[in-house]
């Protein structure tokens, strides 16, 4: 179960690094604007907010990846970091879809791998 948790957590981390790139480094790029459904004007206005949100996504990815790196040698610390990172991702995805049903696909992309990681980590810890 630990292997499932680790792989799912790493996939979740990579997705959140990608989101960081979109929100922080490529926010005003036409392809990114299509993903988020923004106009050039909206993207220019919301750039600082998007960049800040992107940094949060990067930090969640880092916490999760450090947890995966530690879990085989320092079980408690690694599991705690994995759960902190992936659990936060699940909460964010849940909030996204609960506040805007049109974002269900985005929430599914952002929330599925972390949910698998959370469940697998809890099962591993309980075993």
Image: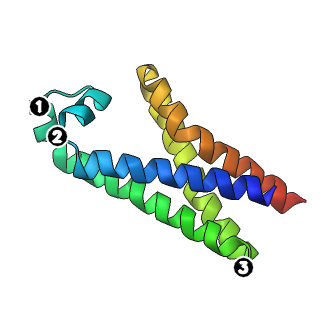
Q: Which of marks 3 and 2 is in front?
A: 2
Who's the residue at 9% across and 31% down the image? Answer: 41
Do labels 2 and 1 touch, CB within 8 Å? yes
Please tell me which of labels 2 and 1 falls first in the chain: 2
- The percent position of residue 125, horizontal first and vertical second, equals 82, 62
User: Spatial distance from mark 3 to mark 1, Cα to Cα?
Assistant: 47 Å
57 with respect to 12 (left or right): left
Q: Quadrant of residue 91?
A: top right
Q: Nearer the viewer, residue 117 or 29?
A: 29
28 with respect to 2 (left or right): left
Please tell me which of labels 3 and 2 falls first in the chain: 2
- The percent position of residue 104, horizontal first and vertical second, equals 49, 25
Of the numbered discs in the image, which one, if any, rests on residue 74? Answer: 3
User: Spatial distance from mark 3 to mark 2, Cα to Cα?
Assistant: 41 Å
Q: How crowded is mark 2: few (under 14 residues within 10 Å), some or many (20 or more)?
A: many
Residue underneath mark 2: 28
5 with respect to 110 (left or right): right
User: Spatial distance from mark 2 to mark 1, Cα to Cα?
Assistant: 7 Å
Color theme of the render: rainbow
Q: Residues within 10 Å of mark 1 (few under 14, many from 20)?
A: some
Q: Is mark 3 on a helix, strand or loop?
A: loop
Q: Nearer the viewer, residue 95 or 32?
A: 32
Of the numbered discs in the image, which one, if any, rests on residue 91? Answer: none
Who's the residue at 66% across and 67% down the image? Answer: 80
Locate the N terminus and report the quarter of the image it occupies: bottom right
Of the numbered discs in the image, which one, if any, rests on residue 40? Answer: 1
Please tell me which of labels 3 and 1 falls first in the chain: 1
Q: In which quarter of the image is residue 40?
A: top left
């Amino acid at each position: 179960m630990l292997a499932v948790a680790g792989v799912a957590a790493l996939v979740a981390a990579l997705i959140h690094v990608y989101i960081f790139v979109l929100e922080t480094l490529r926010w005003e790029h036409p392809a990114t604007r299509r993903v988020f459904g923004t106009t050039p004007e909206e993207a220019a206005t919301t750039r600082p907010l998007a960049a800040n949100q992107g940094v949060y996504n990067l930090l969640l990815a880092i916490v999760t990846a450090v947890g995966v790196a530690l879990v085989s040698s320092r079980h408690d610390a690694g599991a705690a970091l994995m759960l902190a990172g992936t659990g936060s991702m699940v909460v964010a995805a849940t909030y996204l879809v609960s506040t805007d049903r049109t974002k269900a696909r985005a929430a599914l992309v952002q929330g599925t791998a972390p949910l698998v990681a959370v469940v697998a980590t809890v099962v591993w810890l309980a075993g």
